[in-house]
Structure formats: structure tokens, C-alpha cells
């Protein structure tokens, strides 16, 4: 049977005044903090539901130069919003070339 070192209260108390144990403790604490921060970032980015408010404004011009502003608030409940889109555009070049075009796709908002 191997003989192990007996516990010494003086040796334990003296270790608080040594440099190397504090360096190891700070290294472990920094590593745990970085792993926790990365986990929290991933959780908040992909799994935590966010609630944002999007304000939609419609300006309606009526006869007699009277304008009515209709504002609606739309709440976005999920963290990821997927929406299809179609955009049209036109262009004119300096050498009298003109053209039109369009883009279509799926927009993903986080």
C-alpha cells in the first residue's frame, strides 16, 4: 500500500500566496468564461425568441391637399423571418442604351 502525503494546514494556507496557483486559476476561469460566452451567443442568435416591432406607414393623399397618415405596428414573433421578393428596376446609360430588369429570390432576416 502506497503512503500518501498527509494534509497540512500550513501548506494549504501558504498556497494562497504563491504565484503559479493563481495563474492556473485565472486560466481556467478565462476558459470557462469564453465557453459560456460562446454558448450564450449561440443561444441568443438561434434559439431565443425575439420580439421586434415593425412600424408600417401608409400615406394617403386625398383631394384638396389633405393627407391622411395611417400607421400600423406589426409584431415579429419569431427570430428568423423568411419572405420571397420580386424587385424591378430600370437603367439608362450615357450612350443611349436603356433597359429594364428584375430580381427575384428569398430574403432571410435574423
Image: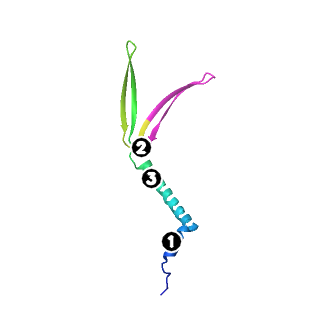
Instruction: Please tell me whether mark 3 sits on a helix, a strand or a loop.
Output: helix
Name the N-terminal-most of marks 1 and 2: 1
Q: Which of 31 and 14 is in front in this view?
A: 14
Front tag of 3 and 2: 3
Residue at the spot 46% in from the left edge and 38% down from the top edge:
105
Residue at the spot 41% in from the left edge and 43% down from the top edge:
80
Query: Dot 1 surroundings within 10 Å: few (below 14), some, or many (20 or more)?
Result: few
Q: Quadrant of residue 67?
A: top left
Magenta stretch encompasses residue 105: yes
Instruction: Please tell me whether mark 1 sits on a helix, a strand or a loop.
Output: helix
User: Viewed as shown, does residue 80 lie left or right of 100?
Assistant: left
In 3D space, how far apart are the residues under numbered discs 1 and 3 (Cα atoms)? 36 Å
Q: What stretch is highlighted in magenta?
A: 85-110
Circle 1 residue: 13
The x, y position of residue 51, in whole percent, is 38, 41
Q: Do callouts 1 and 3 mark residues in contact (Cβ within 8 Å)?
A: no
Q: Quadrant of the C terminus?
A: top left
Q: Which colour scheme is used?
A: rainbow
Instruction: Please tell me whether mark 2 sits on a helix, a strand or a loop.
Output: loop
The x, y position of residue 88, in whole percent, is 49, 29
Circle 2 residue: 80
In the displayed image of the protein, which residue is found farthest to the right? Answer: 95
Q: Do callouts 1 and 2 mark residues in contact (Cβ within 8 Å)?
A: no
Q: Nearer the viewer, residue 26 or 94?
A: 26
Magenta stretch encompasses residue 88: yes
Circle 3 residue: 40
Front tag of 1 and 3: 1
Front tag of 1 and 2: 1
The x, y position of residue 8, in whole percent, is 49, 77
Query: Dot 3 surroundings within 10 Å: few (below 14), some, or many (20 or more)?
Result: few
Q: Nearer the viewer, residue 16 or 110?
A: 16
Amino acid at each position: 500500500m502506497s503512503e500518501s502525503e498527509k494534509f497540512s494546514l500550513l501548506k494549504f494556507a501558504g498556497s494562497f500566496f504563491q504565484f503559479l496557483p493563481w495563474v492556473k486559476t485565472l486560466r481556467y476561469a478565462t476558459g470557462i468564461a469564453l465557453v459560456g460566452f460562446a454558448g450564450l451567443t449561440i443561444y441568443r442568435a438561434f434559439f431565443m425568441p425575439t420580439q421586434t416591432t415593425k412600424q408600417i406607414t401608409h400615406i394617403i393623399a386625398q383631394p384638396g391637399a389633405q393627407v391622411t397618415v395611417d400607421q400600423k405596428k406589426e409584431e415579429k414573433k419569431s427570430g428568423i423571418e423568411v419572405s420571397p421578393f420580386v424587385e424591378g428596376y430600370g437603367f439608362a446609360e450615357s450612350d443611349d442604351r436603356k433597359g429594364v430588369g428584375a430580381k427575384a429570390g428569398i430574403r432571410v432576416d435574423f
